[in-house]
Amino acid sequence: MNRDSLIHTAFFIRSLATLGLLCAVSVSPIVHAATIIPKKEGFGGYVNVGVGVGGIDIEGNMLAKLARGIVDVGDSVIDDIDSPPDSDIAAVPMLNFESSYTFVESRTQIYVGNLLEDFLSFDLYALAGIHQDMKSAGIFSFAVIGTSLSADVWQDPCQTGVKRKDTERSGSGYRVSWERLFNSGLATQFSSKKIDIDDERNGKGLGLSQDERGLLNRNGDLNQLELGYEFQLSGGRHILTPSLVYHDAAMDVGAMAHDGCGASLNYIYLHSDRWRWVFNLGYRNCEYDGVNPVYGVKDDADNYGASATVFYSAPFG
């Protein structure tokens, strides 16, 4: 059993959007690079415990709270729907774990845990799945995923001059990945999530018609395809993984549906057996499908993210 202590995570995200913040950068503060199935049968896993500290800068009024209310990011009362919340510095307790069992003869591993990879897109997901070693073809994985700590959004982000009410934004779906394709560093991953806003009232405060409010519905499906390549340098002490991402948000109707492309870069430095440094950069562009009835134009967004993480392994020996 490997237990790591997550010492510090610094994060920053800036979203340039008019009304929507469903397009977000996934910047992965990960411990390991590609999946490794142990050569010994039995239980295994890891635990990461720590605190994330950093700055949040958001241009948009959709978000209310992060990680089920642990961090407030939005103002409950606004005078103008175009006025984003002030930049802030926040500290967030973080817990990341995985528990697994390996069947060594079939090279199969089943596991449950949670994901930190969507932390900067304001969601924390839990998952349960299976890894299968397919020898020279690589490692195939399948998992079902669901929100563990949701982000809260405003029921109606367009309300002004009154205290707005928040509601939970959650997601569930599946993830399929294929790593080390044909003994190379190539990996691909596809995920599909159904996004659910508990109490969706977007646009009600503006007196929009029922049809116009329907165009602002934030419920729908979020699909993402990622392709990356892992480069191991200096005997594996330096691991560099650039990735390309395509995402498609198929909202139920109208102006919230969007798609776009992005890129990310993950760098891991194995300083010693106990110390690991992980750095991430990410960018993503979103182009919305329909005309936003609030502004009379189609929305677009450019998103940036970065993180720096230090891991100290086996702090209790």
Image (cartoon, rainbow, N blue to C red):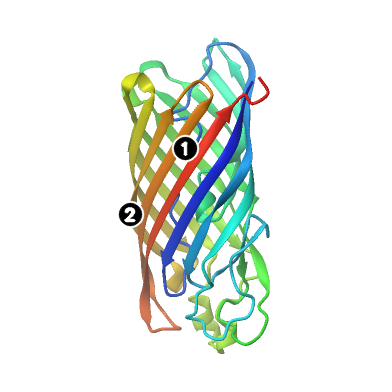
Along the horizontal axis of the image, is 312 left or right of 249?
A: right
Q: How crowded is mark 1: few (under 14 residues within 10 Å), some or many (20 or more)?
A: some
What residue sits 57% from the left and 53% below the top?
A: 123
Residue 25 - label:
none
Amino acid identity at mark 1: Val
**Depth check: 98 or 272 in front?**
272
Secondary structure found at label 1:
strand
Say which residue appears at 36% left-offset and 54% top-offset: 283
- First of labels 2, 1 by sequence position: 1
x, y percent for residue 299: 38, 73
Pinpoint residue 34: horizontal percent, then vertical percent.
43, 28
Q: Give the image location of residue 26, x and y in percent.
A: 45, 49
- The mark tally for this picture is 2
Q: Quadrant of residue 210?
A: bottom right
**Taking the image as drawn, is residue 198 in sight?**
no
Question: Any mark on residue 176, and which?
Answer: 1
Instruction: Specify the quadrant of the image occupied by residue 305.
Output: bottom left
Q: Nearer the viewer, residue 161 or 251?
A: 161
From the top left corner, tell me how far across and down residue 227 is, in percent: 34, 40
The correct choice, above or below, for 43 with respect to 210 in the image is above
The three-letter code of the residue at mark 2 reads: Cys
Would residue 210 be found to the left or right of residue 234 on screen? right
Q: Residues within 10 Å of mark 2 (few under 14, many from 20)?
A: some
Residue 261 disc label: 2
Q: Which residue is drawn at the image coordinates 40% and 16% (left, top)?
A: 135
**Judging from the image, what secondary structure is the residue with disc 2 in?**
strand
Task: Name the image quarter holding the C terminus.
Answer: top right
In terms of image quadrants, where is residue 114?
A: top right
